[in-house]
């Protein structure tokens, strides 16, 4: 039951939040309470639960039995980590929107809760039809978040976001249906059950095209080169909470899809596709970095840095061994935290200076030393300083991939030099140099509290990652080992 | 005893964290006490540990302690563990000892500066990271320290953040060294993938078992580690960042960019010398890089106008000597020179800082002059440091360490003889450039206004370092105490016999350099006109310009050209094409039935024709 409530709670909670209308306090307290309860529910799953193999908990209810569609949910350590990240960042999003969102507060928090529910559903679904349902569910509220509370070019950005994700969603739907039919023709059973579809026999050509369908759908979301162009616009125009959710968790659904579906469902096609996928990842690392370097808009800079970081994730997924996959998990968590924090800081700057243009900044260390110091910290985290989470993720991915793909990995490793170029440029152009006349207050205590939590999280992840690794291990063993059995 | 070891880096780390959190609440005095005090305690502890280590060497000549397991996946482990052996002991003593003196100096030097607490926070963090680097028993932890010192270097070069030039120098330092760091990281991948451990001692053991001398993988790994060393230690071809790093406060230059961090590359190679023995090509490359760098940088130092840049090029050149020593297998000579260099170069920087702080931050030597009478403390310490750097025979520490290197080179075959020659020419350049500075700055007529006076925080470090710059050499000569202590690490055959004739020759060369400097500069000198050659040498043999054209400009050009993302333009093109089609089709929606009927007819006829004709 916990799994069902994990999703239902924010879904149902969105309604009273919506009803609150312009009563800001009511709406945000509803959202906050619901998310905290949700977090507690998720934390209940942390203890050991033997008997289900790598799964911590499973739900299997019939939904549309005639079509083989079931309400199938499952959680393993890997999903649980992402669930915790999702709820944690959703709470952060509510807290940092305290003063930023002034209109239609009820509907804002409703959308925030619904998109969270959609993401949670994506991380928990073990039925491909259900998965697709949640995949679509998380997009619509996000569209509203951008189009109603976004910045200057929000309409353009929202439509672009919608077209890219709907286009890839259509591809995903076709691929899912085709997979179900292929499975039907092979076994005579029509089902969307993930467990049953694993190991479906099909000819290599079919496998390749189906794999490609899933791959493109998920890499649009990740995003990987050359499908990344919706991301800078969406991130930049979204309100701060929207950027945090987009970067922190929506991107992770793409990575999760690659991990959970693309490689396990189509192992041989994925194997032969590995060089292409890895090279796309490496291109993304460098392409995102150089674009980040060239931006004047702070939010766009951070957005392109995400493209670069997600390139590492793509490389790690296709390296497909325990070390690299653990690296992917750590990288996802670290990126969610550090990029989320950077977006919050940029949002705070925009709230104060009414611009995101670095050409109009400089010397802000004088006016807001706390904000500057924390931004410096996360810039350094983002460029991969050992001891902080992002380094560990990248290190494990690269080391894991090195034995089989040494040239690709050696090239990818030099991406960290480019990361230093854009991260330090951000610090210099924004906070160093002659201070302008602009005076603005430093971070509020509410923001400081959030930042403290995020700083501790990223240090903890970098210095003592073993709990995270241990949690993810059974799920990863299931993925990698199951694959060996199929092969 | 091993339980106390983690406290040595932990104390400065704690100081740094305290200063970072409370830097705005703390008074300057408390910040100074925390900053200098934490390193002072760490130094006391380090000397205590050294005392008991030397009095009763532990089994295997090493103390080991694991603080915690960093992570473990499928039998692959990374440990947060420390290991104290004679090699890391030397490093630890120099880092905490010289580090404390420089902290003490900073208390006065930085007084009244904006961000006083922040300065000590960064400086403490540096000491902690540097200690982690040298004490790490695990290669990944070493890398963490390695990146940590790079970060602190960046933070401190750009400490005065209001001037964009400082920020630029800081970023340059970080990015250039990171190119080397990345090579080191790939080197770690190679080692771990083939030897399946991160423990440095175990890696070296397995390398010797698995790889024959001259094997391709050993050579590859050695060259990749060398890449990291070259970046951090500012050797060819990644030396360009160090002179610009002088933008940082002078104590930073003394501690990070002279005494400790820039010698991390030397430490890395010494630490992994077993690997370099397996890769003779790699080791030869170390020596050649050292020989070339010491000559090129020595020549550049000859034409600088800025006193700190003279010392910066001198540092590059002296680290070249250490690389040369490593290249010829004179491991303990390299470490010996590291130690004496830390004494006399820190002294020179602190003395230079003592000059500039009384001269309103004037750094051009041609606008100084006659400072001998006005600033006796700075004069004597700078003179002692210069004498030691120039290897003034018998009475200075620098003489003994440089002799050890030259003797090692001479004993190392034909390639070694060539390197010995480079070292000898370098010795001449060294004494020439440093005494050029001495004579121009301290002799002749006074040109500047002097203000202020020194407190004990400045004078004590100068005095202590002056003594060390003189007597530091006697630890090795005549009793060979230093190399005997390092024997468990490097083996006993590591020191070469000294040839008396060659020693005298080297001594004469050093004296000749001083003599020529006296001839040229012990008279009124004007700032010389810029010739092409001078400009070329002063700008580091054109390396900066070359990299600028080859790497920086293309990168900036591409970033600017593509700042609107060419891929996105393609998608926009698709969207625009759709709109065009939309507009075109809209034209046909005229509302006139005649047109619709005509269209219907034409369409029907066309379809019928298609069916009939096909």
Image (cartoon, rainbow, N blue to C red):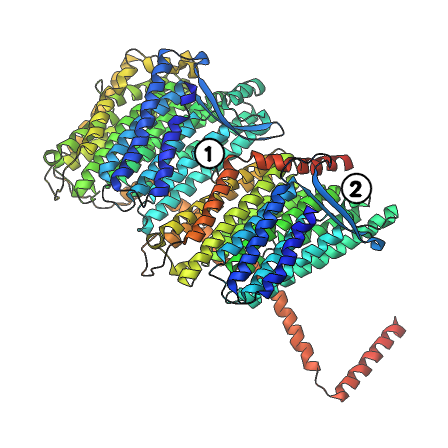
Disc 2 packing (10 Å; few <14; some 14–19; many ≥20): some
Q: Where is residue B520 drawn, in percent x and y? A: 17, 34
Q: What residue is drawn where x is 51% and y is 50%? A: A339
Tell me the distance, in whole angstroms, between the alpha carbons under discs 1 and 2. Answer: 42 Å
Disc on res. A199? 2
Disc 1 packing (10 Å; few <14; some 14–19; many ≥20): many
Tell me, yes or no, whether the two marked residues, 1 and 2, touch with CB atoms within 8 Å.
no
Residue identifier under label 1: B144
Secondary element type, mark 1: helix
User: In the image shown, does B268 or A84 lie closer to the viewer?
Assistant: A84
Secondary element type, mark 2: loop
Vertically, is B243 above or below B483? Answer: below
Give a yes or no on whether discs 1 and 2 share a subunit: no
Query: In the rendered view, does B281 fall on the left or right side of B396?
Result: right
Vertically, is A107 above or below B113? Answer: below
State whether residue B99 appears in this view: no
Chain letter for the residue marked with disc 1 in the picture: B
Q: Quadrant of the N terminus of chain B?
A: top left
Q: What residue is drawn where x is 64% and y is 50%? A: A254
Query: In the rendered view, does B610 fall on the left or right side of B323?
Result: right
Q: Where is residue A188 drawn, in percent x and y? A: 88, 48
């Amino acid at each position: 039951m916990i799994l069902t409530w994990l999703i239902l709670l924010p879904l149902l909670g969105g309604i009273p939040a919506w009803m609150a209308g312009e009563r800001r306090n009511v709406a945000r307290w509803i959202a906050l309470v619901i998310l905290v309860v949700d977090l507690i529910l998720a934390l209940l799953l942390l203890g050991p639960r033997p008997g289900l193999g790598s799964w911590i908990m499973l739900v299997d209810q019939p939904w549309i039995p005639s079509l083989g569609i079931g309400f199938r949910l499952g959680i393993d350590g890997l999903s649980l980590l992402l669930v915790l990240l999702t709820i944690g960042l959703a709470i952060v999003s509510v807290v940092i929107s305290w003063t930023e969102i002034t209109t239609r507060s009820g509907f804002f928090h409703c959308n925030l809760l619904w998109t969270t529910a959609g993401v949670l559903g994506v991380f928990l679904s073990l039925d491909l039809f259900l998965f697709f349902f949640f995949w679509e569910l998380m997009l619509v509220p996000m569209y509203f978040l951008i189009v109603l509370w976004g910045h200057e070019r929000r309409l353009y950005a929202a439509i672009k976001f919608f077209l890219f994700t709907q286009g890839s969603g259509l591809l995903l739907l076709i691929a899912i249906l085709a997979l179900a039919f292929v499975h039907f023709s092979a076994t005579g059973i029509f089902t969307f059950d993930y467990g049953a579809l694993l190991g479906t026999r099909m000819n290599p050509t079919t496998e390749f095209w189906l794999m490609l369908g899933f791959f493109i759908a998920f890499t649009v979301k990740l995003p990987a080169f050359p499908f990344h162009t919706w991301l800078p616009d969406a991130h930049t125009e979204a309100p701060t909470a929207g950027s945090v959710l987009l970067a922190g968790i929506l991107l992770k659904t793409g990575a999760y899809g690659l991990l959970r579906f693309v490689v396990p469902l189509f192992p041989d096609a994925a194997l032969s596709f590995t060089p292409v996928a890895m090279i796309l990842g490496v291109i993304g690392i460098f392409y995102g970095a150089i674009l980040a370097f060239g931006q004047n808009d702070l939010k766009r800079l951070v957005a392109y840095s995400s493209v670069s970081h997600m390139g590492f994730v793509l490389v790690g997924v296709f390296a497909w061994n325990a070390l690299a996959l653990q690296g992917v998990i750590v990288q996802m968590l670290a990126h969610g935290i550090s990029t989320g924090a950077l977006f919050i800081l940029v949002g705070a700057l925009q709230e104060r200076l009414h611009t995101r243009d670095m050409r109009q900044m400089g010397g802000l260390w004088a006016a807001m030393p706390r904000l500057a110091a924390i931004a410096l910290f996360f810039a350094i985290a983002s460029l991969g300083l050992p001891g902080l989470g992002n380094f560990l993720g990248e290190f494990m991915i690269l080391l894991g991939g090195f034995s089989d793909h040494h040239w690709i990995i050696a090239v990818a490793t030099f991406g960290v030099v480019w990361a230093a170029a854009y991260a330090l440029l951000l610090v210099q152009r924004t906070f160093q140099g002659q201070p302008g006349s602009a005076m603005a207050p430093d971070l509020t205590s509410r923001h400081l509290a959030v930042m403290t939590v995020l700083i501790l999280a990223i240090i903890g992840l970098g210095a003592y990652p073993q709990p995270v690794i241990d949690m993810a291990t059974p799920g990863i063993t299931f993925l990698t080992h199951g694959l060996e059995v199929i092969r | 005893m091993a339980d106390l070891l983690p406290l040595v880096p932990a104390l400065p780390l704690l100081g740094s964290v305290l200063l970072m959190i409370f830097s705005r609440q703390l008074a300057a005095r408390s910040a100074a006490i925390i900053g200098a005090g934490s390193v002072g305690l760490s130094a006391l502890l380090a000397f205590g540990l050294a005392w008991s280590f030397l009095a009763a060497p532990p089994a295997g000549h090493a103390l080991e302690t694991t603080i915690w397991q960093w992570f473990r996946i499928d039998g692959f482990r990374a440990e947060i563990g420390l290991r104290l052996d004679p090699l890391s002991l030397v490093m630890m003593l120099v880092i905490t000892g010289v580090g404390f003196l420089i902290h003490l100096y900073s208390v006065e030097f930085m007084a009244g500066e904006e961000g006083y607490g922040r300065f000590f926070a960064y400086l403490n963090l540096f000491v902690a990271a540097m200690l982690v680097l040298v004490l790490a028993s695990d290669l990944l932890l070493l890398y963490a320290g390695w990146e940590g010192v790079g970060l602190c270097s960046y933070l401190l070069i750009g400490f005065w953040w209001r001037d964009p030039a400082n920020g630029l120098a800081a970023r340059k330092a970080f990015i250039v060294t990171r190119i080397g760091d990345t090579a080191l990281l790939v080197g770690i991948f190679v080692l771990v993938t083939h030897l399946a451990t991160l423990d440095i001692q175990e890696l070296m053991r397995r390398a010797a078992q698995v790889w024959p001398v001259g094997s391709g993988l050993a050579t590859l790994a050695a060259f990749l580690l060398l890449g990291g060393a070259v970046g951090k230690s500012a050797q060819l071809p990644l030396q360009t960042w160090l002179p610009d790093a002088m933008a940082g406060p002078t104590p930073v230059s003394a501690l990070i960019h002279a005494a400790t961090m820039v010698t991390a590359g030397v430490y890395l190679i010494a630490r992994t010398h077993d690997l370099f023995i397996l890769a003779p090509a790699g080791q030869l490359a170390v020596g050649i890089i050292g020989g070339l760098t010491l000559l090129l940088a020595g020549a550049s130092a000859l034409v600088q106008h800025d006193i700190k840049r003279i010392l910066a090029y001198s540092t590059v050149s002296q680290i070249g000597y250490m690389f040369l020593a490593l290249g010829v297998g004179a491991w303990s000579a390299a470490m010996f020179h590291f130690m004496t260099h830390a004494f006399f170069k820190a002294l020179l920087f602190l003395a230079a800082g003592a000059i500039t702080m009384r001269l309103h931050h004037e750094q051009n030597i041609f606008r100084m002059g006659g400072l001998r009478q006005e600033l006796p403390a700075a004069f004597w310490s700078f003179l002692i440091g210069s004498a030691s750097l120039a290897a003034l025979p018998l009475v200075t520490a620098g003489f003994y360490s440089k002799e050890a290197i030259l003797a090692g080179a001479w004993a190392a075959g034909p390639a070694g003889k060539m390197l010995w020659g480079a070292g000898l020419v370098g010795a001449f350049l060294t004494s020439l450039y440093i005494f050029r500075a001495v004579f121009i700055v301290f002799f002749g007529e006074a040109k500047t206004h002097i203000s202020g006076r020194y407190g004990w925080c400045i004078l004590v470090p100068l005095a202590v370092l002056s003594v060390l710059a003189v007597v530091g050499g006697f630890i090795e000569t005549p009793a060979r105490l230093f190399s005997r202590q390092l024997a468990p690490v490097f083996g006993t055959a590591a020191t070469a016999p000294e040839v008396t004739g060659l020693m005298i020759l080297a001594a004469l060369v050093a004296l000749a350099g001083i003599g020529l400097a006296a001839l040229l500069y012990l008279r009124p000198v004007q700032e010389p006109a810029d010739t092409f050659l001078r400009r070329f040498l002063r700008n580091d043999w054109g390396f900066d310009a070359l990299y600028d054209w080859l790497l920086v400009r293309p990168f900036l050009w591409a970033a600017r050209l593509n700042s609107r993302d060419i891929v996105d333009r393609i998608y926009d093109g698709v969207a625009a094409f759709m709109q065009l089609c939309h507009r075109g089709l809209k034209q046909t929606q005229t509302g006139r039935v005649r047109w619709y009927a005509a269209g219907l007819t034409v369409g029907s006829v066309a379809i019928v024709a298609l069916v009939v004709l096909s």
